[in-house]
Image (cartoon, rainbow, N blue to C red):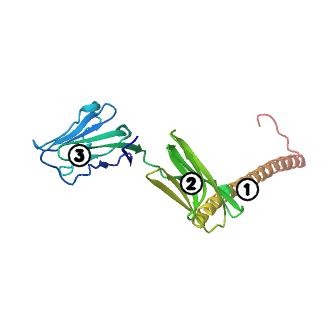
Amino acid sequence: MAGVFGVSVTEGDSVTLHTGLTELMNDDQILWRFGAENTLIADINVMVNRLTVYNEVLNGRFRDRLKMDHQTASLTITNITTEHAGVYKLEIIGANRSSKTFGVSIFARLPVPVLIFNSSQCSSSVQYCSVLCSVVNVSAVSLSWYKGNSLLSSTSVSDLSISLSLPLEVEYQDKNTYSCVINNTISNQTTHLDITKHHQAWEGTAAEANLVHSCDSTEAVLRLVVSTLVGVAIVAVLVYDVSSARGLKEEREQYNIVSYAGV
C-alpha cells in the first residue's frame, strides 16, 4: 500500500506509532483511527485541553492498551495481540496539518528450539551422531543450523502453524560449536550444541544402560545359583530318607523284629 509505514512487533510487546511532531500547536487536533472502517480510537484537542482514548469501541479491543503522548500525540499500544494488527491512520488538523498511515504486523513470540538425539546412536562406538532441532506451533519462520557463523542448512514455513524440524549429522569427536536458530523478520531464538560438552551426558546414559543390564544379568545368575542349591538340598533329603528307611528294615530283619497292628 503506497504511503504506508510498515511496523512489525512481537505479540505481548508494546509499539509506538510516532506523529513526527516535537510539540503541539494551540489549534491542533490529532485523530487516531483503526481498520477499514476508520474507527476513532484516540484523539487530542489542544484548544479545549482534552485527551480521549475510546476503550469501548470495537467491543473493547483496545481497552486499557492505548496511551497518547501529551507533547507529541504519538500513540502507544501496550500488550499487543494479533487482533491489533491492521491499518492505523493519523490525521492532524490545524497548523501542523498532515496525515500518516501505519500498517502494523504482529508476530507470535518465538519458541526456543529443542535438540533431540538418540543416546544409543551418540557414543564413542559410532563415528557420527544425528541431532534433530525441533520447534512446534510456528508460522512465518525459518529454522537453520549454523557451524560457527556458517549456515549449514535451513528450512522455512509460511503462514501455517505447524511443527518444524531440521536434522544435523556431526562427528562424535567434533570440536566445533553448532547453533540451531529460529527467526522471523524481527526476532530470533537460538539453542547451542557443543559436542564436547555432550560427551559425558551421552556416555553416562550408555554406561547407566550397561549397568542396568549388568545388574539384571547378575541377579539372574544369583537366582540360578540359589535354585540349584535348593534343588541339591531337596535331593539330599530324599536320599537320606530312603537310606534311613532301608537301614531300619535291615535292622528289624537282623533282630527278628516283627511289627503287629496296634502294637
| Distance in Å between CA atoms under marks 3 and 1 | 76 Å
User: Can you tell which of label 3 and label 1 is closer to the viewer?
Assistant: 3
Q: What residue type is labelled 1?
A: Val
Mark with earlier residue (3, 2): 3
Choose between 146 and 199: the one closer to the eye: 146
Q: Name the residue under label 1.
A: 221
Which quadrant holds the C terminus?
Answer: top right
Q: Position of residue 202 (x, y in %)?
A: 62, 61
What is the quadrant of residue 100 in the picture? top left
Q: Name the residue under label 3.
A: 67
Horizontal arrangement in the rendering, residue 6 relative to residue 183 (left or right): left
Q: Where is residue 171 in the image (x, y as percent from the top left)?
A: 67, 63
Depicted 195 relative to depicted 46: above or below: below
| Distance in Å between CA atoms under marks 3 and 2 | 38 Å
- Secondary-structure class at tag 2: strand
Could you tell me which residue is drawn at 85 percent across and 44 percent down? 257
Choose between 166 and 195: the one closer to the eye: 166
Which quadrant holds the N terminus?
Answer: top left
Mark with earlier residue (1, 2): 2
